[in-house]
Amino acid sequence: MRKLLNTLYITSPHYYLSLDGENIVLLSEDKIVNRIPLHNLEGIVTCGFKGVSPALMGKCAADNISLCFLKPSGKFLARVSGEEKGNIALRKTQYRVSENKEESLEYAKSFIIGKLYNSRQVVERAARDYPLRLDTEKLKNVSGDIRNSIFSAKDCESADVLLGVEGEAASRYFSVFDDLILQQKNDFYFKTRNKRPPLDNVNSMLSLSYTLLASMCASALETVGLDPYVGFFHTDRPGRKSLSLDLMEELRSVFADRFVLSLINKKIISPKGFTKMQNGAIIMDENTRRLFLSEWQKRKAETITHPFLKEKVEWGVVPYVQALLLARALRGDIDAYPPFMWK
């Protein structure tokens, strides 16, 4: 099983990153602030604009260390990757399946069924854990609607119909998302999903968590030899990692959404750490972003039992496990791709 290594998060916009031997050197105004070994890192995420030296970018590419650039708001900018590696036969199979509507639809259905199942589980668990604080009948109704959507997804005969089923189920899921926010309701509320830019504190955190999750999925796919740009549910679009978005669908609610809810309900995140810009966008200040990323790293290290493998794995390794299972399905080693279904 893949070992979960660390991800280095650079939250200050004032650091320049360079390479010294096998170490990352953090510089501020040409002074060394810190020196970090590369050997225990699997990724670097930087939210600043000072930059990274070409030598460090080349080293990360050669050592398969993900290097991701975000705006201070958390919006994705770019990701550095090295020479394409992996089994060419696997990628050719991936490309062939993506061009075949029937085969591609089967994989797309698996991703969406996993997404709907996990969304329903999040709603069901909330109703079970907080029966005295929540309108359980309302949650049960939404759970039932999503359950019906799962059956509809299984019977879909086209990608367009599947997209409609997914959209309707997502709308029902987010219709009760605000109910799942139990603390700090005056400052953390959810009316609708908005992005580019996020217009409230909750959407700001959701957008950042989705960006981080998408980066994890892209790294996982590249690690097992798949092309993250060629998807089965998300159609091809220049610059879009469609397969990464496919893979993260089943993990959005149970990984990213529950993480954001936990930060709010446990009062780990304070509303004081958010600022409204002139264009209406909500961004986190540096300290809040640092806290958010620290908690994200802790969540990645938490252990669960994988529902398909029946083995204990860290949350941070789940995207890699799913990417590996997807590769095995494409190679014909297993009959079909088993989506991650949270228990």
Image (spheres, rainbow, N blue to C red):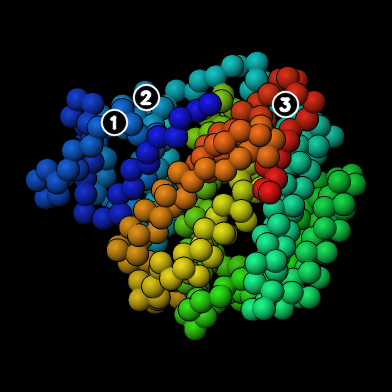
Compute the Cα span from label 3 to label 1.
Answer: 33 Å
**What label does residue 38 carry, if any?**
1
| In contact (CB < 8 Å): disc 2 and disc 1 | yes
The crowding category of the residue bearing disc 3, from other C-alpha atoms within 10 Å (few below 14, some 14 to 19, many at least 20), is: some
Q: Is residue 268 visible?
A: yes
| Above or below for 159 versus 197 | above
Residue at 86% from the left image edge and 46% from the top image edge:
154
Where disc 2 sits, the SS reads: loop
Amino acid type of the residue tagged 2 in the rendering: Asp
Q: Name which of mark 3 and mark 1 comes first in the sequence.
A: 1
Q: Is residue 165 left or right of residue 20?
A: right
Compute the Cα span from label 2 to label 1.
Answer: 9 Å
Where disc 3 sits, the SS reads: helix
Residue at 41% from the left image edge and 55% from the top image edge:
295
> Residue 174: x percent and y percent?
67, 67
**What label does residue 329 carry, if any?**
3
Amino acid type of the residue tagged 1 in the rendering: Leu
> Residue 80: x percent and y percent?
40, 36
Q: Is residue 229 left or right of residue 288?
A: right
Q: Is residue 146 left or right of residue 221?
A: right
> Residue 57: x percent and y percent?
32, 32
Q: Is residue 237 visible?
A: no
Compute the Cα span from label 3 to label 2.
Answer: 27 Å
**What label does residue 261 carry, if any?**
none
Task: Say which quarter of the image contains residue 291.
Answer: bottom left
Where disc 1 sits, the SS reads: loop
**What label does residue 63 carry, if any?**
2
Residue at 52% from the left image edge and 80% from the top image edge:
185
Task: Say which quarter of the image contains residue 54.
Answer: top left
Number of marks in the image?
A: 3
